[in-house]
Image (cartoon, rainbow, N blue to C red):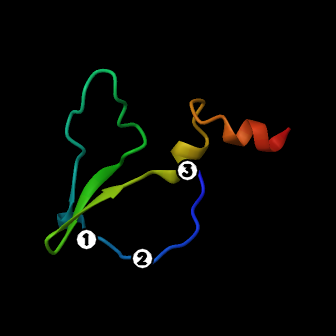
Amino acid sequence: MVIDGVFDAITLAPEQMRPVPELSPTVSSDHLPGIGSVGDRMVILLGIEKLMTSNNMGLMAQTLQ
């Protein structure tokens, strides 16, 4: 995963956040702590720490070798 820029950072109030809906049995939502709403936009919240340390990613293990 490569992030080459951040355009905006916002703080969401608890009332702007919703739980992630049930996806499918084959799709894990472990890395998605919630969905936010900002005006008329929907924002998908990504738990980057969980994603980068996930066994599925394997990036941290490769980097440390």
- The amino acid type, in three-letter code, at marker 3 is Glu
Q: Which residue is mark 1?
A: 13
Looking at the image, the residue that sits furthest to the left is 40
Is 32 on the left-hand or right-hand side of 62?
A: left
Where residue 4 sits, quadrant-wise, is bottom right
Q: Which mark is residue 49?
A: 3
Residue shown at 35% from the left, 74% from the top: 11
Residue 10 percent coordinates (x, y): 36, 76
Where residue 29 sits, quadrant-wise, is top left
- The amino acid type, in three-letter code, at marker 1 is Ala
Is 23 on the left-hand or right-hand side of 11?
A: left
Real-space Cα separation, disc 2 to disc 1, in angstroms:
13 Å
Q: Secondary structure at mark 2?
A: loop
Contact, CB < 8 Å: mark 2 with mark 1? no
- The amino acid type, in three-letter code, at marker 2 is Ala
Where residue 65 sits, quadrant-wise, is top right
Instruction: Answer few, some or many: residues within 10 Å of disc 3's Cα (few below 14, many 20 plus, some between 14 and 19).
Output: few
Task: Using the image as rendered, state which of residue 27 and residue 11 is in the foreground.
Answer: 27
Instruction: Answer few, some or many: residues within 10 Å of disc 2's Cα (few below 14, many 20 plus, some between 14 and 19).
Output: few
Instruction: Answer few, some or many: residues within 10 Å of disc 1's Cα (few below 14, many 20 plus, some between 14 and 19).
Output: few
Indicate which label's residue lies in the foreground, 3 or 1: 3
First along the sequence among labels 3 and 2: 2
Q: Secondary structure at mark 1?
A: loop
Residue shown at 60% from the left, 57% from the top: 2
Residue 45 vertical position relative to residue 23 in the rendered view, above or below: below
Q: Which mark is residue 9?
A: 2
First along the sequence among labels 3 and 1: 1
Indicate which label's residue lies in the foreground, 2 or 1: 2
Is 54 on the left-hand or right-hand side of 31?
A: right
